[in-house]
Image: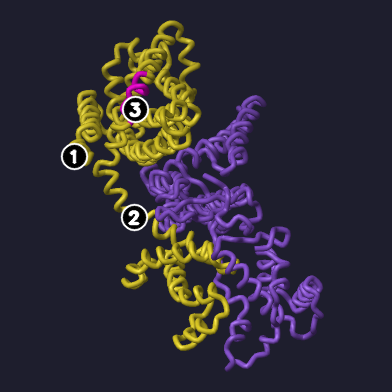
Chain colours: A purple, B yellow
Amino acid sequence: MSSTATDPWIRRSANPKLDRIMVSPEGVPLNVTVATAGARAGALTLDILIILGLILGVTLFGLLVLWGFEAAFGGDTSLEESGPLSVVAVFWIIAVFLFRNAYFLYFELGERAATWGKRAVGIRVAARDGGRLTAEAVIARNIIRDIELFLPLVFITSGEAEGTMTDFTAWAGFLWVLMFLLFPLFNKDRLRCGDLIAGTWVIQNVKRNLDGVVAPSAEASTNPAAGQATSRYEFSDSDLSVYGEFELQTLESVLRTGTDEALETVTNSICAKIGWEPGSGDERIFLEAYYTALRAKLESGMRFGKRRKDKYSADI
Amino acid sequence: MASVMTDPDLQQAIETAALKSDRFRLEREADWVRLEEIVTQMEKGKARKLSDEDVLALPTLYRTLLSSLSIARESSLDAGLIDYLEGLALRSYFMVYGTQTSFGRWLKGFFGGGWSQAIREIKLDIWIALFVMIAGTVIGYVLVAGDSDWYYALVPGNFAEVRVPGATEEALRGTLFSTEEQDGLGVFAAYLFSNNAQVAILAFALGFAFAIPSILLLIHNMALLGAMLWVFAQRGLTVEFVGWLSIHGTTELFAILLAGAAGIHVGRSLAFPGAKSHLTAASDAGKRAALVMAGVVIMLICAGLLEGFARQLINNTGGRYLVGGAMLLFWLTYFFVFGRKRAEIAS
């Protein structure tokens, strides 16, 4: 799997090392970003807290039921072995088993392929080969979680509680946990052992809104009915040959989100570059006109397969 | 989200757009926004509230979007637009190719042959695991027969209160046919299931380390059994002990056998991937083994119920053999005969 983005000089994520390409069954390469180790750790911590919370909730509920029986039928009945105590105990053991094993399964088999913790940090599970995420894969990746996480947790806590823990076993247990916890850091796709066995990986969710057209006022320039004065900006070819795609996209983000001050700064630096005298009060109109003209030039180059990465590359 | 313009406005906007790429975008925007609304609904788990037209339109809209994305990447320099299309393409891709089998349908496929099929596919590993388990039992028996101190090393303390080397025949018989525990049977069964399931999951998961820990775990557990067998054999209770064990043991030991075999299968394909890459071999084996493991948990539920209830309620050796043997026959038929013809026809 190559790590070149389809659009090589658009920076997609904070850490380009995590950008990957997944080819959809239609043959279209889709850009995905592998979830960072920090996001994974955060999601896992949240999930453990949620599971502990659920176990605590069921325990309290069980105690409440017992208390209710005691209040209703007197103190003796609930303590008999075949009485409500054993029913509650059966229920409790099964519930804890399910929380421990089925919590991850249930949520990762859902539409969003993510537990509550993963949803909170914005990541999800996906099949590494671009195919469907199957139930078997989700089962496999979560069964392995048992030796990665729960086994050492149980081992260490029970060892502490019973006092049978020697220094040697404590350290061995600690190393075991460390080996599995740090496993994702030692491969480039951040796979944990379970991901490796199941053929899955964890990637970032993307949710972006569709912004409006970047330079709406420039559109009206060809329409005489709108009567705007944008036509007074005419750029020669040499005015437009100072910048490339990188600068165009910087300009786009300034136009989308920039303050008036930012617009002024950018106007001044563009004017200095192309040898114009910056006017004042008209920055947005000027920048939109320049943006549209520059983009028209670069896009017409694209149609002939010529691209210009930034101002340092050769003009098209 | 951009507000969708009304028709005359849109027409005018398309005509007046200065850039070809903006015209391209304005012409297709309505479809993208519709797809985004469908996908957002599905992500919220409200797929059932979608109208029939929307559901039917989803694949078409998705493919249109992919083609828009391909065109935009090659002809537009609007980074915001491309980011939006990339994100939406990925989101709708996950909806179109997501986990679409409902749990019910998966379960039907699982019991209707998927489980048996997976077990037949790891037959070699089952033989290996069976050999290892028998060897473990023999080792336990021989060790304790040679030096009875081995017993205390093999058997954990809580098992070894009464069942120790040199215990009287009555004491041992008492452990096999006692009726004391009958009251707390439900709790006992649930506890046994939870405990055994964790052991089985462990046996599978440890296969990750080239199957060696799985094999060691199987040997250790079976050596314990062999050691116990020796204790009962010394007092001439072999037949009764095997009966006591077999009522749930045929199911439980079979489940542990399968779990171990699944672990060995994963470990073996990691160590010897054949023509595939290590990663592909591991994930193929992992998915097959996961099916087996889902079944193992179900078998252990049965074993827990048999152990908790049936063993304490059926208090004679003949009845125990009958139940144990019937269970074994049932599992063998289900795994190795059921669904075989259908699989052959399919292949």
Q: Which residue is drawn at 52% across and 66% down?
A: B72
Q: Dot 2 surroundings within 10 Å: few (below 14), some, or many (20 or more)?
A: few
Q: Mark 3 lies on which chain?
A: B
- Main SS of residues in magenta: helix
Looking at the rendering, the stretch of residues picked out in magenta corresponds to B122-131
Q: Earlier in the sequence, mark 1 or mark 2?
A: 2
Q: In this view, does B125 lie above or below A222?
A: above
Q: Quadrant of the C terminus of chain B?
A: top left
Q: In the rendered image, is residue A74 in sight?
A: no
Q: Which residue is drawn at 57% across and 64% down?
A: A302
Disc 2/disc 3 C-alpha distance (Å): 31 Å
User: What residue type is disc 2 on?
Assistant: Ser
- Chain of the residue on which disc 2 is drawn: B
Q: What residue type is labelled 3?
A: Leu
**Residue at the image position 50 percent from the left and 56 percent from the top:** A30
Marks 1 and 2 share the same chain: yes
Tell me whether marks 2 and 3 sit on the same chain. yes
The dot on residue B253 is 3
B9 left or right of A255 in image: left
Q: Are marks 3 and 1 on the same chain?
A: yes
- Which residue lies under the disc numbered 2? B102
In percent of width and height, residue A212 lies at 57, 76
Residue at x 34%, y 53% (from the top left corner): B103
Magenta run includes residue B28: no
